Amino acid sequence: MVKLPLRYPFIKMMLENQVDGYYLHKQYELHGKDLVLMNDIQSFFSVGTIKIRSRDGHVIYYVNSLKNLTTTIIPHFEKYRLLTQKKVDFELFKQIVFMMNNKEHLTPEGLRKIISIRASLNEGLGETISADFPGIIPIDRPLVDEAKISDPQ
């Protein structure tokens, strides 16, 4: 069994524009020297894809299947809670996955709500999504509870 790091340096929820609409994926990004670790993470979860970004050599592990997000990734992070702002990002991400599982992204209102949630995550909206959805107002981010790590002893 692979031992995963306590915190993931770059965890992003991506909403990308494709020819047939927007799709969701969760990605974990590390420096290229961490390819072995990223392969271990992929082996641990048994889902997802790894790619190496040519412009900077970063290794990216991503999962874009709603089924895999719902049955594998989300249960893991519910069992092993994230800390700090990543906890808030995860809860918002989980809300988007729930909405997409309920097909809310197929209505204009549902998609705009998802985009509003996405605007509150990580680095906000990219230029393309901002241009496609002008006037989106990010939702208010919940505050993070004080993170306390219990002594395993």
Image (spheres, helix red, strand yellow):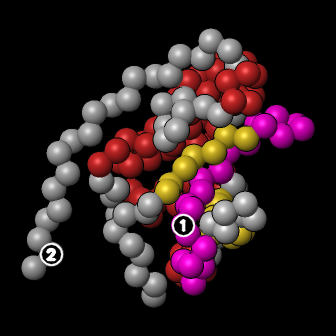
Image location (x, y in percent) of residue 38: 57, 75
Nearest the eye: 130 or 87: 130
**Up/down of 107 relative to 61, above or below:** above
Dominant SS in magenta: strand
Q: Where is residue 77 drawn, in percent x and y? A: 42, 59
In screen coordinates, is 136 left or right of 80? right
Q: Which mark is residue 152?
A: 2
For marks 1 and 2, give the one nearer the viewer. 1
Q: Is residue 31 above or below residue 136?
A: below
Pointer 1 residue: 30
Q: Quadrant of the N terminus?
A: bottom left
* Residue drawn at the location 33% of the way across and 31% of the way down: 142
Task: Tell me where residue 39 sits by quadrant.
Answer: bottom right
The stretch drawn in magenta includes residue 32? yes
Q: Quadrant of residue 116?
A: top right
1 inside magenta stretch: no
Q: Is residue 98 visible?
A: no
Residue at 39 percent of width and 72 percent of height: 5
Q: Residue furthest bottom?
A: 1
Residue at 50%, 22% (x, y): give it. 138
Please state which of residues 124 and 13 is positioned toward the viewer in this rendering: 124
Looking at the picture, does residue 135 appear above or below residue 23?
Answer: above
Q: Residue furthest top?
A: 135
Question: Where are the magenta residues, as a range?
Answer: 17-36
Quick one: SS at disc 1? strand
Q: Which mark, residue 12?
A: none
Tag 2 or tag 1, which sits nearer the N-term? 1
Q: Callout 2 environment at 10 Å: few (<14), some (14 to 19), or many (20+)?
A: few
